[in-house]
Structures are given as structure tokens and as C-alpha cells.
Image: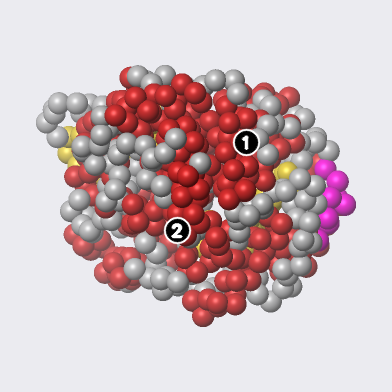
Amino acid sequence: MDPLIRGLFKEFRETQELLGMAESDAFELFVATLLLRDDVLDQVDMTDLLLDPATIGIDLAILEVNGELVTQRSEVPGVCENKRSLEVVLTLMQVKASTSISSSEILNFGDAAKKVLSNTVPSQHPKLAAVSDALFGIFDGYASKLKERPRVNLAFVSTANDASLADGNVLDRAATVQREVQALSYVGELAFELYGATRIYEASRKKTQANETDIVLEKAVNLPGMPGINQAILGVVSVRELLKLIQTEDGTLNERVFYDNVRGFKGEENDVNQQIIETLGSPQRALLPVLNNGVTVVARSYAPKPGDAVSLTGYQVVNGCQTSHCIYLAQESLGDAADSVYVPIRLVVTDDEDVATRIIRATNSQTAVNDSDLVALTKFQKRLEDFYLQDQLGAGLTYERRAGQFYYRDVTRTRIVTISEQMRAVAATFLDLPHLAARYPQHLYAEVGDSIFDDDHRLAPYVASAFAAYRLETAFRTSLEAEYKPIRYHILMAYKYELFEGRSARLNERAIDQRSQQMVDLLRQADYVSAFRATAQRIVEVAGGQLPTADRLKRPPFTQELISRLIRG
């Protein structure tokens, strides 16, 4: 392995607590964290990305529908049913740690990709076969909703040097794979990328370094001093300068700068976004500054430069996600007009988290936003974050109230609890809703939003449930059999019943504090893996001697049957 990449990989294994995992599997996860978007990674426990052992030709397979992950056919209706249109993306990767690159391995990767795209994956590779079958489930039930044919992203990753990647045989084999996959009539846009040591390093650098750029502000006005704010500026920027804020060095959209924006892009079909794009493509584009609210940018540091330029570090576009995306999509039609069309900008420089949160909430509350989008900004979330910091239970976890909050801090990633992870953990462990816990965060909040994050809830069960989920994931990374992963949320619920010999106290009862502490203390003991294994075996026993089907796990009757058996002992 390239020595620089080995150093980065070593740090990754240590911070992600993967030292007990096979090096090849850990390297696949290392690559996944670098090349996959963070909003994709946030939807799964990292180890779920690994395919079945001995899966040949493909190491990572990601199917997205409108940004939501789909891992099997049974999940397709829940994701597709209520959507007006569907954008489908299939990402397949082959990952090798070797410094050499074999042209025959590229052809094998292509053959495996064609099997996925033709739903002919051998049954001995069930996880990969399930992804393939899910794709065809979309074709079978929702073909008319497809905005376009599915996009396919292929990536062959090694730690080879640039010269090896430029070898004629390697490029010929890659071209062959691309040609054969593109020949499938139902494949839309296709990308085939070869990654070596240089590109892996660049991907790592982009993931770990703060957003930085220089832009020119036009007609800027400095606002008077305000508590907690180092600098505040109102002005306008040209579309060309705004693109510097939202694009990466290679011209692709930098999704990292939108992490603190509570709403994702609503798509080109959204009525407001259609109007923005139409305006940008019309002679009326010069009116954009008076037709659009512009963007709000919060940065950690700021430095004036010669002329009207400023240097920004650690910045986020906290409001204006729709405008930014529309400008990115319309830049080709704008052409040279990108220099003469302007966008209003509000620039706030602060290192005060509370001030930043108030700005995000204020700038996003003037138009309709889903309740789950703003949950991070509630008083309860702030209290919960502080409770995690106090660590009264000895869990050693950190709560990430806002996405990307810890990019600039030395925090072990596996010990960070996101809001979506917290929702899943408390829903499964203390609300007896393991059948709902695996849902996409927006869907999960719609189901349990009235039952969690209440101001009168005790904070200890939130930490205890997150710690239980963390220890269960650690068990899977070490010695707990991967076959039990489909029942992970039922394990969390069943473990609580077995620990407390029945139902626990409610989330707003003082008695739950003591039980939460008891749960954390027991899960810190050396034999915690065997406890989870025994719980998993009990669930299998209740299910009739074999793992329940995915469909059965997602329905309340099995949860109720399991609870009844656990209460009876």
C-alpha cells in the first residue's frame, strides 16, 4: 500500500475503532467514507456497507432513490410510493489496497456490474443480489415515475500511482467495461472512475479540511458590532463569485457547504426553483437581486484581501440552498452573464455556536420547513447536547446536534451520535418501535416525532439508548455474528426487556435515570458481546428458529409477539 495512504488508513482504523476488523474490509470502509457523500453515510451504520464475504468483483453497492438508500425490494414502495418523480443512482465499487492494478480485475469488475444491472447476481451473494433486485423492483413498479434512466457510477479503487492508472491496457479495459455497460438500454448517464493513491489522498484532504475560498464582494456594507459576532456584512456577489463558494476545485457541487442548511435541494420540479432557473435563463436575469432573497453564509474566520476580496474559512451556506443549486444548474446557460448577474449575500463571521444556531433558525423559519428539519435547533436538543458533554453516565459519547459540527475538533467518529442515530436508538430501545427504527430519518420522525424530544423527558435514557446502539455496533465490528444485523433494533429492545425483566419506566419518569445508568454500566463490562448474542438467539427462537424475514421485521405484529414472549419469560 502507498505509505501516505497507509498512514491515513491507520488513523482511520484507530478513530473508527476498526482495529479488530480484517484489513481488507476496513480499507473498503475507509474508501467508502472518502468517496460517498456524507448524507449517504449518515443513513447507515458504516459496517452495513460491507457486502457478504467472498462477494466477487464488487465490494460496495449503493442504490439511491431521490437520495434515500434502498437495500432490498421490500423497501422500494416506502421510498417511491408518494414521490412525483424518481431519480435513481446506482454506485458500484471495487476496492483494492494494492499498489498495482490488474487489467483483468477491471474486466471482472465490469462483469460483476453487468450481473447487478441484469438482476443475475448469484444467490450466494444475498446482499448484492438484494440491491440488484431492488433496482428491478423500481423498474417493475415505478418505471413511469423515473425522471430519467438510472445513473450508474462505477469506481475501481487501488493505491496505484498515476503512471499505472495511465497504462494503455488499464485504460483499454476500463473503456471496454464502460462500453459494455452503456450498451444496456436502460442505463442512463454512466461514469467510470479509476482511483489511485493521488485521488484517494485528494479525497481525504477534501473531507477533512475546512471549507476555504476567496470571493469578491460587490457593494458591501459592514454592519455595526453585535454580541457574539466578529463581523457582519451585507452586499451582493456575482454568480461567478457565488460559484466559488459552492463548487469544489473540479467544478462539482460541494455538498459539504450545505450541511448546516436545514433543507436539502427540493429539485428542479419545485415551483419556486423552476422560477429561479427560468429567470436565470431569461433576459430578466439582471433582476435577480430584487427577485431573490439571496444566501446567508456563516463563517468561522474572515480576512480582508486587496480590493473587495475577502478570504473565508470554515464557512457554511445556512440559507439559500435552493438558490445556490439553481445557479449551479443554470451556469452553462448563463455563460458570460455569470459575471454581471448578482445575488444578495449576508455574511456573518462567528465562532459562537449558539449565535450560529440562532442565525440558522431565524433564516430558515421565514418559509415553510418540516418539523424534523428544525429539530436540531430546539431547546431540548441543546440540553441534550450539554448532557452528553457532562457525561454523567460514563458513556463517553458526543452528541452532534448540527451536521458537520465536529469537522474541526478531535472527536472519535464512532462516538459521535447524530440526531437520526439518536431517534433510531431511543425508538427501538425505550419506545418499543424497532420495526420503525430503520426508516429514513424524515419518515421516522413523521412516525415518532410526537413521542420523542419532549421538554419533560429525562435525558439519561437518550444517552443510554445511544450507548447501547454504539456497543452493539462495536460488537458487530469485533466478534458478534453479522447474520444478526437485520435484527439489530429488535436486539436493542429485547436487551432492555431482559435487563429490566419487563417494561422500563417511561421517558418522563425519574425512575428511568437509574435504569439508564444500569444499562450503561452493564454494557461497559467485558462480556457485553455474549449478552447481545444471547438476546439475538432469543429473538431467533421467538421467530421460529430462524431469522425473521425483512418484511416481518418491519411490521408491528412481530414486535408485539416478541414483547409478549419476553414479558412471560
Q: Determine which of the numbered discs, if any, sits on residue 197 in the image.
A: none
- Mark 2: few, some, or many residues within 10 Å (few <14, many ≥20)? some
Secondary structure at numbered mark 1: helix
Q: Residues within 10 Å of mark 1 (few under 14, many from 20)?
A: some
Give the amino acid type for the residue marked by disc 2 in the picture: Pro
Q: Please, is residue 59 above or below residue 191 in the view?
A: above
Decide if residue 465 is on the left or right side of residue 542.
Answer: left
Residue range in magenta is 101-111
Pointer 1 residue? 533
Magenta stretch, main secondary structure class: helix
x, y percentage for residue 293?
22, 55
- Asked whether the viewer can see residue 198, the reply is no
The kind of secondary structure element at disc 2 is: helix
Q: Residue at x 22, y 58 (%)?
A: 368
- Residue 206: x and y, percent? 53, 36
What's the residue at 68%, 27% (across, down)?
20
Furthest residue in direction bottom, as rendered = 144
Query: Of the residues shown, which amino acid type is indicated by label 1?
Result: Arg
Out of 217 and 294, give the one closest to the viewer: 294
Label 1 or label 2, whichever comes before in sequence order: 1
For residue 138, which quarter of the picture? bottom right
Give the side of residue 9 with respect to residue 424, left or right: right
Q: Residue furthest front?
A: 568
Q: Which residue is mark 2?
A: 556
Q: Is residue 220 above or below residue 74?
A: above
Labels 1 and 2 touching (C-beta < 8 A): no
Q: Look at 59% across and 66% down and name the residue there.
A: 73
Q: Is residue 380 left or right of residue 314?
A: left
